[in-house]
Amino acid sequence: MKEKKRVYEALVDGAMEGLTDQALYDFVKARCPNATSKKIVRASLLALTDPHLRDRNILDVIYALAIKHRLDDGVLDDGEDEELDERACASLAANQNMPQLT
């Protein structure tokens, strides 16, 4: 929790300084070298739900960063896609062996 709080603070500080996109990501990584994309996305969601943070521009910048890094291959690569692909292939193979109903 402490690490997420530091990443959150770095996100908000960087966004308040006018940093966006890659510059904001680099700023957060400089202040929190151990921050992964996943931690940055989670801290971004924490910032987006903070009732005290009301500046629309800051929220937009943080939201854009969260979306960009949520769609990053490193964040989504948890093995679920491969498991789903294997099940889909197995299902297709099973359906090919089934007789057609007319």
Image: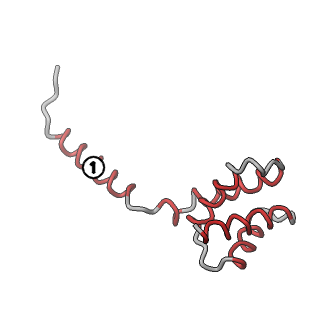
Number of numbered tags placed on the structure image: 1
39 and 71: which one is in front? 39
Circle 1 is placed at which residue position? 87
The quarter of the rendered structure image containing the N terminus is bottom right
- In this rendering, position of residue 33 left or right of residue 62: left
Callout 1: 10 Å neighbours few (<14), some, many (20+)? few
- In this rendering, position of residue 56 left or right of residue 83: right
54 and 24: which one is in front? 54
Q: Please tell me in which quadrant of the rendered image residue 101 appears.
A: top left
Q: Is residue 80 above or below residue 24?
A: above
Residue drawn at x 75%, y 73% is 27
Residue drawn at x 38%, y 61% is 79
The quarter of the rendered structure image containing the C terminus is top left
* Furthest residue toward right: 17
- In this rendering, position of residue 22 left or right of residue 91: right
Q: Amino acid at mark 1?
A: Arg
83 and 40: which one is in front? 40
- In this rendering, position of residue 85 left or right of residue 58: left
Q: Position of residue 57 (x, y in %)?
A: 83, 51
Residue drawn at x 64%, y 61% is 43
* Furthest residue toward top: 102
Q: Is residue 30 above or below residue 51?
A: below
Q: Position of residue 71 (x, y in %)?
A: 57, 56
Q: Please tell me in which quadrant of the rendered image residue 9 appears.
A: bottom right
Q: Position of residue 76 (x, y in %)?
A: 49, 59
- Identify the secondary structure beneath mark 1: helix
